[in-house]
Image (cartoon, rainbow, N blue to C red):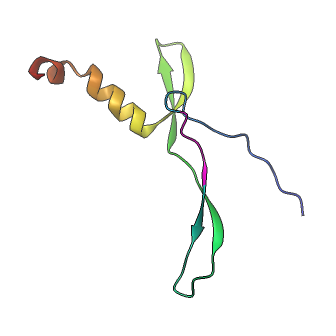
């Protein structure tokens, strides 16, 4: 059986990547699963494109919101 290696996808800002977890049913046996971050393509300065997790996208959106900055 050949296992394909997928290149590790990491957030460009916080370096969040894949994590190995386990499925644990009531019978308590365990099977491995891979939990991947929600990575989206995002452009910086309209040119550079990179993968950013949605948590970082939300944080960047909050910091750049002009209405939010007026009240703080």
Residue beneath the point at 41% across and 33% down: 56
Return the residue found at the far right. Answer: 1
Split into 4 quadrants, where in the image is the N terminus? Answer: bottom right
Identify whether 32 is placed above or below 46. below
Over which residues does the magenta segment extend?
15-19
**Residue drawn where x is 19% and y is 18% of the image:** 66
Q: Quadrant of the C terminus?
A: top left
Where, by quadrant of the figure, is residue 57 drawn? top left
| Total numbered labels | 0
Give how far across and how far down residue 43 sits, in percent.
49, 21
Is 44 positioned to the left or the right of 31 in the image?
Answer: left
Kindly give the residue lying farthest to the bottom in the view shown. Answer: 27
Q: Going 53% across and 12% down the picture, which residue do you hit?
A: 47
> Main structural element of the magenta stretch: helix, strand or loop?
loop
Q: Residue at x 52, y 46 (%)?
A: 37
Q: Is residue 31 left or right of residue 37?
A: right
Measured from the top left, where is residue 49 in percent x and y? Answer: 56, 21
Give percent across and percent down for residue 8: 68, 40
Figure check: 58 above or below 27: above
User: Where residue 50 appears, x then y in whole percent?
Assistant: 56, 25
Side of 18 where 66 appears, left or right: left
Residue 64: say if magenta: no
């Amino acid at each position: 059986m050949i296992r394909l290696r997928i290149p590790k996808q990491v957030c460009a800002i916080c370096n969040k990547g894949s994590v190995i977890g386990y499925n644990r049913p009531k019978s308590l046996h365990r099977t491995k699963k891979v939990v991947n971050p929600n990575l989206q393509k995002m452009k910086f300065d309209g040119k550079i494109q990179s993968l950013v997790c949605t948590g970082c996208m939300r944080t960047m959106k909050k910091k750049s919101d002009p209405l939010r900055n007026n009240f703080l």
